[in-house]
Amino acid sequence: MTRKRPPKPTDAELALLRVLWGNGPATVRQIRDAVEVKQRTGYTTVLKTLQIMTTKGLVVRDESQHAHIYQAALAQEQTQRQLVSELLERAFSGSASLLVVQAPTEKPASRKELAEIRHLLDELEES
């Protein structure tokens, strides 16, 4: 039996997920306040987006308190893997090497990032 993955989050949903991954479970107001720093967003817009995300399985809602608390249903790494997997198949025909070669040409990697990539490649070679 295959496990159904939640659908790919939209850009607006990813913005809310980033807040939840960075700050942990939060109320609608806390999430809106965090998003407001980068982009003007209304309370009802955040609430409606969170309700849709709950239905889609992207977040879970704790209704035990007066103000509902939302948290991401999946860890950040799981969502990133899902997005990369889809990108890999759609844009690079499943070729990880094409993805890795193309990524730093769009936005050059820092020395630290390149060192992390080398370290990861060394670990992958050893396993």
Image (cartoon, rainbow, N blue to C red):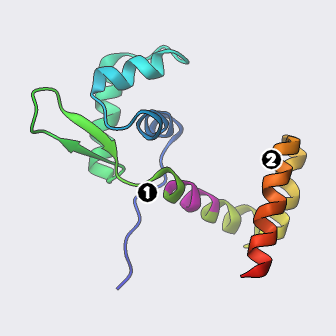
Q: Nearer the viewer, residue 32 or 45?
A: 32
Q: Residue placed at 37% from the left, 70% from the top?
A: 4
Type of the residue with mark 2:
Glu
Q: Residue placed at 80% from the left, 62% from the top?
A: 119
Q: Which of 121 and 6 is in front in this view?
A: 121
Q: Where is residue 37 in the image (x, y as percent from the top left)?
A: 51, 15
Q: Residues within 10 Å of mark 1 (few under 14, many from 20)?
A: few
Q: Could you say whether the residue bearing mark 1 is in a helix, strand or loop?
A: loop
Describe residue 5's horizontal placement relative to residue 116 as left or right. left
**Disc 2 marks which residue?**
113
In this picture, is 56 found above or below 38? below
Q: How far apart are marks 1 and 2 (CA)?
A: 29 Å
Which portion, as a residue range, is magenta? 79-84
Quadrant housing residue 126:
bottom right
Q: Could you say whether the residue bearing mark 2 is in a helix, strand or loop?
A: helix
Q: How crowded is mark 2: few (under 14 residues within 10 Å), some or many (20 or more)?
A: few
Closer to the N terminus: mark 1 or mark 2? 1
Describe residue 6's horizontal placement relative to residue 26 as left or right. right
Main secondary structure found in the magenta portion: helix
Residue 7, disc: 1
